[in-house]
Image (cartoon, helix red, strand yellow):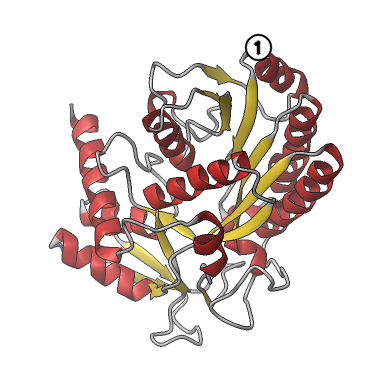
Amino acid sequence: MTVLVTGGAGYIGSHMVLGLLDSGLPVIVLDNLATGFRTAVPQSVPFFEGDIGDADMVSRLIESHAVDEVVHFAASSVVPESVADPARYYTNNTVKSLALIDAATRAGVRHFVFSSTAAVYGNPARMPVDEAALPQPMSPYGASKWMTEMLLHDVAKVRGMGYVVLRYFNVAGADPELRCGQSTRAATHLIKAAVQTALGLRDGLDIFGTDYPTSDGTCIRDYIHVTDLVGAHLSALECLRGGGASATLNCGYGKGYSVREVVNAVKRISATDFPVRLSGRRAGDPAAIVADTTKLRRKLNWVPTYDDLDTIVAHALAWERRLLGMRVR
């Protein structure tokens, strides 16, 4: 039994590879290195540079490595970028995912876990939002992921493949042992950008939108530690192996923090006061979104370990300091 991780050289994918190795499961990685890093994948893991849209390559990998499970992370994931270039997002996230799903099901893959997003919900009318809410994505990024969810459901149903769709809320933090973390220097994630600013790697932090209908006028998000997210993926695979039905599940903690609250947490944990610039809203950003995680906890018996904003920030800061030390040397 081998697990194929697409996008395994990226931020979340590289943590998943470590989680599989820690669980004693054989794993291989497929990544085109457009945003990932070869160094994020342990040397012991077979690595293949290539594109998920290359169906022939995917089929060969599945056959030659006896792959029967796929965890699919490979995607483009920047909301404003998707608004500016929707065609690229629909190609990368939907068209190529269909090629991967088709190849996997034809090759007899039994289980498939798909990395989706809370962006499928748009600006939900009720919060916390549960999986029964009608998807109303506000960006091509969210729409491209929702389309892939539908494709996966339809193809898997006909071809008998079990799957779990995990809708991520805001993923942050780093491996507690600092084996990997978010390494993209110009990443747009709030906590990543804030800790970089605290360390002097940016000249200031932009807050996009201060006139939202929230407690302090800034967006509210549900932040989940990347290691807890990996735990949800491992539990999803275990559930499918045990005969569990296919499902779509939210991945968050069910608690929301405003942008200002996150910035204040980073300032407190880093003991640094850094400049903050107030900017206008970005296209595609909902005012607030917080997960209802009842279904995730019940179906997968999932219990988070790092359910604490300060812990998430501390791990992100420690990883950024490690990267800074590596760059200096």
Identify the secondary structure beneath mark 1. helix
Residue 153 appears anywhere in the view: yes
Residue 31 is situated, as x and y percent measured from the top left of the image, at 56, 27
**Quadrant housing the C terminus:** top left
Side (left or right) of 89 relative to 12: right
Foreground pick, 199 / 65: 65
- Residue displayed at 66% across by 59% down: 142
Q: In the rendered structure, which amino acid carries the disc numbered 1?
A: Ser
As drawn, the residue found furthest toward the left would be 271
Side (left or right) of 85 relative to 290: right
Foreground pick, 305 / 194: 305
Residue 303 is situated, as x and y percent measured from the top left of the image, at 40, 58
As drawn, the residue found furthest toward the right would be 158
Residue 312 is situated, as x and y percent measured from the top left of the image, at 30, 57
Residue that label 1 marks: 64
- Residue displayed at 44% across by 41% down: 11
